Amino acid sequence: AATTGLLVAALLAAPTAAFRVVLFSKTNGFRHASIGAAVTRLSADLGARGAAVTATEDAAALVAAVDADAVDVVVWLMATDSASSPLLDGAQRSAVDAYVARGGGWGGVHAAY
């Protein structure tokens, strides 16, 4: 809970101009009932501070954003998977790993990756 609070506080304190956030809430396992409310709240709070927020459950859209460096931070938002059905395939995971290795921001909120 403390880590989640720090992540949210950091995002809300982020620069207001041209700050790009992707909220990734795909689930292939347990799905939290509060995902919709979390996406709505973070989108509104960050948007009110001038951030461009994209919420998606589409792994291809996430990878397109990180490959193009079109995002400042990716937030895994209650994203869950299962051993038989991972959120990302190998190439997609490599793309996200490479984005982070280049200095791209990544954070997780509850049950994240």
Image (tube, grey):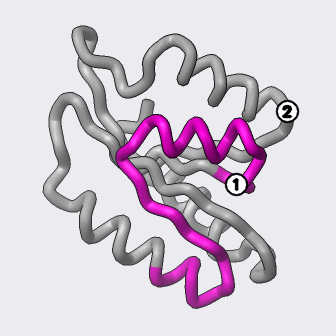
- Which residue appears farthest toward the bottom when viewing the image? 48
Where disc 1 sits, the SS reads: loop
**In the rendered image, which residue does mark 1 sit on?**
71
Quadrant holding the C terminus: top left
Where disc 2 sits, the SS reads: loop
Residue 31 position (above or below residue 100):
below
Spatial distance from mark 1 to mark 2, Cα to Cα? 12 Å
Q: Give the range drawn in magenta.
A: 44-73
| Residue at image location 74% in from the left, 55% down from the top | 72
Q: Report the disc number at residue 85.
A: none
The answer to which image quadrant residue 111 occupies is top left
Residue 23 percent location from the top left of the image: 48, 56
- Which residue appears farthest toward the right when viewing the image? 102
The answer to whether residue 65 is left or right of residue 31 is right
Mark 1 neighbour class, 10 Å CA radius: few under 14, some 14 to 19, many 20 or more: many
Magenta stretch contains residue 57: yes
Mark 2 neighbour class, 10 Å CA radius: few under 14, some 14 to 19, many 20 or more: few
The amino acid marked with disc number 2 is Arg
**In the rendered image, which residue does mark 2 sit on?**
102
| Residue at image location 70% in from the left, 54% down from the top | 71
Residue 93 percent location from the top left of the image: 55, 21
| Residue at image location 35% in from the left, 40% down from the top | 79
| Residue at image location 29% in from the left, 26% down from the top | 81
Considering depth in this image, is 6 or 69 the residue closer to the camera? 69
Residue 2 percent location from the top left of the image: 50, 54
Of mark 1 and mark 2, the one earlier in the sequence is 1
The answer to which image quadrant residue 6 occupies is bottom right
The amino acid marked with disc number 1 is Val
